[in-house]
Image: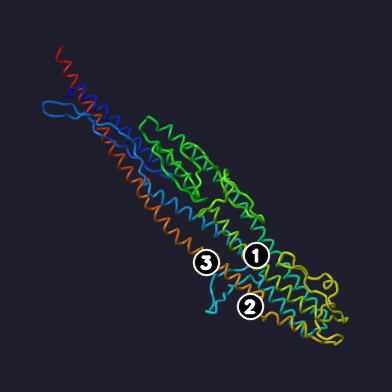
Amino acid sequence: MLGLLGTLSMGARALQTQRQGAEVVGQNLANVNNPAYARQRLLVQSSAALPTLAGPEGTGVDASSIQQLRSALLDQQIQNELSTSGFLESRQGALEYIQAALAEQLDGQTASAGGTSTVGNSDSSSGLADDLDSLFNAFQSLSTAPGSLVERQLVLAQAQSLARKFNQTDQRLQNLKSSLNDSVSTDLDKANTLIRNIADLNNQIVNAESGTGGIANDLRDLRQQKIEELSQLINIETNASDNGAVDLSTGGHALVSGCLLLDTLQTYDVSDNRLLVRTANSELPLTLTGGSIQGAIDTRDGALADLRQSVNKLAGSLISEVNRLHSTGFNLDGGTGAPFFTGTNAADIGVSTTLLDHPALIQAAGDQGTPGDNQVALALARLANQKQDALDGQTFSKAYSRTVAALGQSLATTNTQIDDQKVVQNMLLSRRDSISGVSLDEEMTELVKYQKAFEASARLITTVNEMLDDVINLKR
């Protein structure tokens, strides 16, 4: 049997256990606002029983371990969803920048069953659509007064405005391409830092848990936080090892194995200033399926490249058609053959400096030496409603409207996907919070339980102490 001294020892162990339990509750309360923290619980078990004539007699309680309340399945699901969210948010941001570069308000609405799309309300002072309309309206005004220098100057002013808008749009899109490359490089540096951090935390966890039988919960929390931060940048695969480390890979390439850092990521220029990603130890491109890095790459090589190509095709077709008609006309001095626009695409389109210096040289007449003839000016005005083979059978305005509306539809689709993604992600985060999150009410209840148990254990020690005094006094 225990005896008084054994009971005193049992009370001391109980005090120590309840104190440790209160300390764990205090750790939970201290981290109530730490989103990376998973709450902990002290696991206790009965001490080894002593055999007695009446049967095995309990000897109190011992703290066995500190348990971290986590669901590995939920962590894996959240990790995957974060990669999807990172991809979509990166794409959304890039598409919004493209919208700003176009200076058009995108509504993403498709028009009638004819398959064409409509542009939303455009910025009346800065959109390419308005400048296109203004140029053809100026040609129309010139056709009503082909001999007017004022009308000719108006045509040149509108043409210059349109050319500058094409130049600005192309430059903005080029700058956005560079910005997306910079974003890829910056996020890649962050990813490499996180990969190194995870390898280092693996080492710390293995060393902390080796031979102790305990779990390095706080280090595991920090590592999970780093893994989830990395998931927002690239899609990753993780595999837990028996020694507490986590193996890390992406696109079939191992990055971290146990405590070893096997590889890192790097960018390389594939062509035309397009940065892609590969591992440092491989020359093959890395296949990423999620994360903000891939979101930036996909938007740069997809929506942005397609848009820039469409704008260049529009500018090239406009240059070709206007010059074709203009070169057949005659100016006020009877001259002919001069081009109206210079350049070949949106980047270098401009208005002939000869015409800018001498508006009378605009070739608006269809017959030489016929004052008031407006055949070419009228033909130029009618270009606004003529379908162009180079633009897939669309007029200039319709082709641009379709281009802008396609971008708007991509942005609207991405916004919808993000809304749906947030629902899924928030559901998983809420589920994890119900398991791993710190509840103030629950922790305060646990604290009261440990407090009362501590007081009772202290009372037991006091009682046994009094009994020992009585035994000692029997010998006096």
**Residue beneath disc 2:** 393
Which of the 4 image quadrants contains residue 391? bottom right
Residue 30: image x %, image y %? 41, 40
Secondary structure at badge 1 equals helix
Residue 78: image x %, image y %? 42, 51
Q: Is 1 situated left or right of 370 in this image?
A: left
Which of the labelled discs sits on residue 412, or is there none? 3
Secondary structure at badge 3 equals helix
- Residues at circles 2 and 3 in contact by the CB criterion of under 8 Å: no
Q: Is residue 187 above or below residue 261?
A: below
- Cα gap from disc 2 to disc 1, whole angstroms: 19 Å
Disc 2 crowd rating (10 Å Cα; few below 14, some 14-19, many 20+) is few
Q: Is 365 situated left or right of 15 in this image?
A: right
Q: Label 3 amino acid?
A: Ala
What residue do we see at 16% from left, 24% from top? 1
Depth check, mark 2 against mark 3: the one in front is: 2
